[in-house]
Image: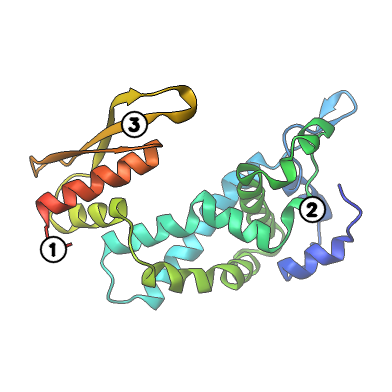
Amino acid sequence: MTSRPRDELNAALGYRFQDSALLEEALTHSSVESGTAKSADYERLEFLGDRVLALVIADHLLKIYPGADAGTLALQLTALVRAESLTSVAIEIELGDFLFLSHSERASGGMEKPAILADACEAVIGALFLDGGLEVAAEFIHRYWDARAVAVASAPKDAKTALQEWAHAHDATEPVYTVTAESGPPHDKTFTIEVEMGGVGDKASGQGSSKRRAQQAAATALLEIVEPEV
């Protein structure tokens, strides 16, 4: 762990733990060993924190968007609890500076790895819940997610999100993306991906330098077929 005072993390969390061992567990990566025994890591607390975050965010979305249908709420929830959002919060509170990592993991930049930051952030939420209850965990979540909940509703939708919403609104099944071709050298690949929705019958393909970009291109192409004005 770094030499930064724990009080700085307490301030960012807005809470001082009664059981400091819970916070220590939430900050401990699975690479850490204590002597010959493996230390308790954050994975169990991460499991709990994931559920607590989803509950608090779902409740908040119902309250601030009373007119939104279930499909829209589900998409907003997914955007808010995904790894990118958790990583963003972890960076905001500088959580990486307080993590317990093995020497090799720290040397490889573990303090800044998005996956580790996202998992540890969920673990901290789980620890807050166990130590202070739902009210304490919710207070932390509201502090860092309320503005994000407003932003996710006003942000322009990408093609995949727009296509998924179209599927919900027209009783079609979820869009399914399939890689149909890969070309080019490993450092400069081009992917071709096909997307289709059950109950619609139409399908479309798109290409891109990554699977994500190819999926977006395919979604854009299918939207132009099923809903040209979107």
Tell me: residue 146, above or below residue 40: below
Left or right? Give the position of 24 relative to 81.
right
Distance from disc 3 to disc 1, alpha carbons, whole Å, reads 27 Å
Mark 3 vs mark 2: in front: 3
Which residue is located at x 76 percent, y 42 percent? 28
In the image, residue 207 lies at what x, y percent?
Answer: 29, 37
Q: Which quadrant of the view contains residue 95?
A: bottom right
Q: Is residue 13 visible?
A: yes
Q: For marks 3 and 2, give the CA distance.
A: 37 Å
Q: Is residue 16 visible?
A: no
Examine the rendered structure and indicate whether residue 148 appears above or below residue 170.
below
Q: Quadrant of the C terminus?
A: bottom left
Tell me, for residue 191, which label it has, or none. 3
Q: What residue is disc 1 on?
A: 229
Q: Which residue is mark 2?
A: 97
The amino acid on which the numbered mark 2 sits, given as a three-letter code, is Asp
Give the Cα separation between the discs numbered 2 and 1: 48 Å
Residue type at tag 1: Glu
10 Å neighbourhood of mark 3: few (<14), some, or many (≥20)?
A: many
Earlier residue among tags 3 and 2: 2
Seen in the picture, residue 174 relative to 129 is either above or below; the reply is above
Mark with earlier residue (3, 1): 3
Q: Position of residue 71 (x, y in %)?
A: 27, 59
In x, y percent, where is residue 35? 90, 27
In the image: residue 27, left or right of residue 133: right
- Quick one: SS at disc 1? loop
> As rendered, which of 225 and 29 lies closer to the eye?
225
Q: Position of residue 148 (x, y in %)?
A: 50, 69
Q: Secondary structure at mark 2?
A: helix
